[in-house]
Image (cartoon, helix red, strand yellow):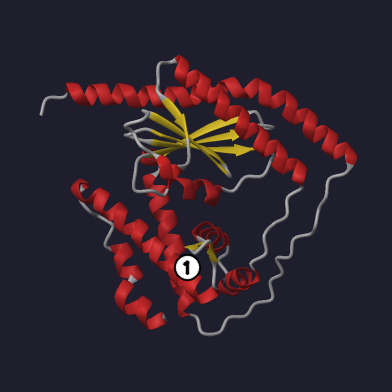
Amino acid sequence: MSQELTSNTSSQHALQSTDGKSEKKVDYDWTKMIALLDYVCCKVSERYGLYSGGQTRKAMITEIISRNACIACIDKQLRTKNSQRIDSMYGELHQLGCNLLVEELYCRLVKSGHKVNITTEADLNFGKADIFIVPCYYGLSLHTNRKEIVVEVKSGFGLSIPQLLRYLIDKNPRALVLWRIRNEQTVVLEKSKITPLLTQFIKMVVSRTDRLLLASDVHCKHNHRSKAWSPNSQQIQQTFSDFANAVVRTLPHVVETIMAILNEEETSSVEDCKTPP
């Protein structure tokens, strides 16, 4: 496996070759970067048996590798395959926030004259609608024929930057709306505006994965065991109270934020049509 990675992929050489390219090569290089990331993740899946429904667990692999500089720690966490347990109340609040957003956004889009369909990603057909809302485990995604908007819903105070960056690593134009309900914050990240950061992130993951796959024997004395935590009655009461107030106050704002991105896209589309060939 190590020889195959070195001879066929030449990861470091491939990464270096993406620097200093002309603007004409940007799309090609970005596609090549994503393909390289997919390749090394597949290799990690093969070594550690990390599959879900027959698919590579790319999100888990990327998260673990991007968070640890120690190869031995990465190796231990990939072998452990422990999933973090979340109190059911937090999961329920997250799901409620997602459902409220789906329906509010649907009504707003229809009122604005759009033909909208709430569906699964496998059923996208732009002959039936001009905007698709796809509910998913992290929130939802909106699909038009020109762009995708990913909406990450956070019902707690936790935040993973690598997770947010992963959402933007895609071949198609994509924007991310982060809705932090209890913080009462809405943040917008545009792939086109942080491409250099995304590129550097991919380089880091690929380089670190190279070191992992080429390492024959790894050991360390680091301890990353997380303590089990369960909220008490007072904390649950406070959490529910914070959520109930914040979700009502911020829901209209996150909907308007998404609508603004869509309107900006439509304006850009009209301008493109007016531009002479």
Q: Is residue 180 visible?
A: no
Residue type for callout 1: Arg
Residue 108 lies, in percent from the top left, at 50, 19
- Left or right, residue 15 beside residue 72: left
Q: Residue at x 16, y 24 (%)?
A: 275
Q: Which residue is mark 1?
A: 208
Q: Is residue 203 above or below residue 5?
A: above
Residue nearest the viewer, comparing 264 with 115: 115
The quadrant in which the C terminus is found is top left
Q: Residue at x 26, y 62 (%)?
A: 17
Q: Is residue 235 above or below residue 15?
A: above
Residue 21 lies, in percent from the top left, at 22, 53
The quadrant in which the N terminus is found is bottom left
Residue 85 lies, in percent from the top left, at 73, 55
Identify the element where label 1 is drawn. Answer: helix
Residue 159 lies, in percent from the top left, at 62, 45
Q: Of all residues shown, which one is farthest toward the bottom?
A: 216
Q: Is residue 115 above or below residue 80?
A: above
Q: Residue at x 55, y 72 (%)?
A: 71
Say which quarter of the image contains residue 89.
top right
Crowd tier of the residue under label 1, counting other residues whose Cα lies within 10 Å: few below 14, some 14–19, many 20 or above: many
